[in-house]
Amino acid sequence: MDLKDKIDLTRLPGHIAVIMDGNGRWAKNRGEVRVFGHRNGVEAVRQTATAAAELGIRHLTLYAFSTENWKRPKCEVDALMNLLVASLSSELGTLMDNNIRLKAIGDLCHLQKNCFAQLQETMAKTAGNTRMDLILALNYSGRWEITEAARKIAGDIEQGKITKNDVDQDLFSTYLDTSEIPDPELLIRTSGEYRISNFLLWQLAYAELCFSPKLWPDFRKDDLYEAILDYQHRERRFGMTSEQIKPLTNQ
Ligand code: FPP
């Protein structure tokens, strides 16, 4: 039986978030420069996105460039931006064929101009697609997003649009970049590192965490299926007891 056939399609996570890690080490293992790893990471992106769409996952968020990634050597940052622009253009066919809509979260206005323009173009061309949203986190960090939300809320209180008593978790969520996206139920991080790295800090509150030893360029459809199967074996309690959860899940 294939791994894919073992997945219970009635209990899929609606939203999977992925920290794609290990490109640099993958390249180093082959005596190549780091950018070689990023370039080979594109196939893993393609496989993960198509596998998720084929299964019926509604939202897939990939951490493609963090606010901290600007600290990398300029040649790597430039190469990553160029790769992103080239991939957004060359993968348009994959997105259309699989009925995937591209979205993005993060401080997009401060991306390099050509990257921002290509992103807008691909998002516009895929805007009518309905099977799955592929969300790229670009120039993104969880603390940046939460701080921005707090600043916008303060501004709206100052202008009298809301009062401080209106601020609760539901309202706060609407000020985040992900306001129209449900929280991820599953986070996958590759490369055997056990960190969140400032990714979706608010949204991951109740996510199941799955760590794969694979370096990102080696990640394939079966690795995604394995992570989903692992998720389906977890008991999600949301602060309740196992005894309280059982009757709810048997309904
Ligand atoms: C982390 O590996 C990876 C990144 C910071 C960039 C991810 C980018 C891609 C996979 C390129 C294509 C993306 C899209 C969406 C088309 P690392 O460099 O931190 O690896 P290391 O920990 O081994 O050094």
Image (spheres, rainbow, N blue to C red):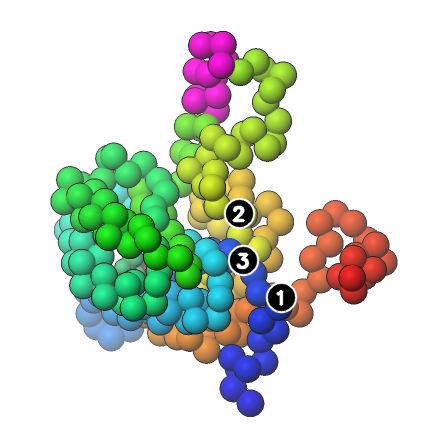
Between residues 194 and 183, which one lies in front from this camera angle?
183
* Picture residue at 42% right of the left edge, 61% below the top: 131
Quarter holding residue 42: bottom left
Quadrant that contains the C terminus: bottom right
User: In the image, what residue type sits under mark 2?
Assistant: Pro
Please state the horizontal and vertical placement of residue 201, each as a whole percent of the image.
51, 42
Mark number displayed over residue 182:
2
The residue positioned 38% from the left and 51% from the top of the image is 135
Q: Residues within 10 Å of mark 2 (few under 14, many from 20)?
A: few
Q: Write the residue at 43% across / 21% down.
A: 151
Q: Quarter holding the N terminus?
A: bottom right
Q: Is mark 3 within 8 Å of ligand 1?
A: no
Q: Which residues are magenta?
A: 150-161
Image x and y of residue 229, in percent: 58, 72
Nearer the N terminus, badge 3 or badge 2?
3
Instruction: Please tell me whether mark 3 sits on a helix, a strand or a loop.
Output: loop
Report the Cα–Cα distance between label 3 and label 1: 9 Å
- Are the residues flagged by discs 3 and 2 in contact, CB closer than 8 Å? yes
Residue picked out by circle 3 = 14
Query: Which residue is painted at 53% across and 52% down in the image?
Result: 184
- The residue identified by callout 1 is 11
The answer to whether one can see residue 97 in this image is yes
Q: Earlier in the sequence, mark 2 or mark 1?
A: 1
